Amino acid sequence: MTNGTLATPETQTQTKRILRHLLDIGPINPLQALNLYGCFRLGARIWDLTQVGIKIESNRNPKPKYAIYRLEPGSENWINANTYYNTIK
């Protein structure tokens, strides 16, 4: 796997923290990403992860409107996510 669009160290750090959250804690929404990790663009970080083959599902909360992201279940996806996590600096 490659680092995809992770062009800056800050982007890499945010992506790594969000991936660790998905692996250890579970679902994440934009407000959590902002409060916990200083990430204003959770959707972009999720896109970065999907570009390297990590399967992430999203559900939309109707009111107020926002997305909730979680790793798709399956041992292969968890292995891929953990492997990629270890490659991010």
Image (tube, rainbow, N blue to C red):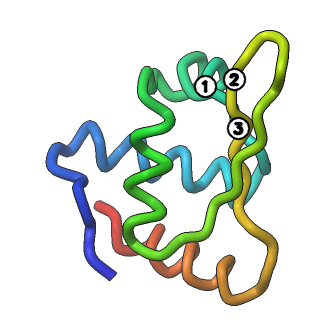
Q: Nearer the viewer, mark 1 or mark 2?
A: 2
Q: Quadrant of residue 67?
A: top right
* Residue holding disc 1: 30
Q: Residue at x 26, y 37 (%)?
A: 10
Residue holding disc 3: 28
Mark number for residue 71?
none
Residue at x 83%, y 21% (from the top left corner): 62
Residue pushed farthest front? 62
Answer above or below: position of 87 versus 20: below
The residue at 50%/81% (across/down) is 83
State how far apart marks 1 and 3 are (Cα).
Answer: 7 Å
Q: Is residue 72 above or below residue 26?
A: below
Q: Report helix, strand or loop for mark 1.
A: helix
Judge from the rendering whether residue 81 lies leftward or rightward of residue 72; answer left or right: left
> Residue 8 appears at what percent x and percent y?
16, 44
Q: How far across and down, in percent of the image, does residue 88 sit? A: 34, 64
| Residue under pointer 2 | 66
Between residue 28 and residue 50, name the one nearer to us: 50
Q: Residues within 10 Å of mark 2 (few under 14, many from 20)?
A: some
Q: Is residue 47 left or right of residue 56?
A: left
Secondary structure beneath label 2? strand
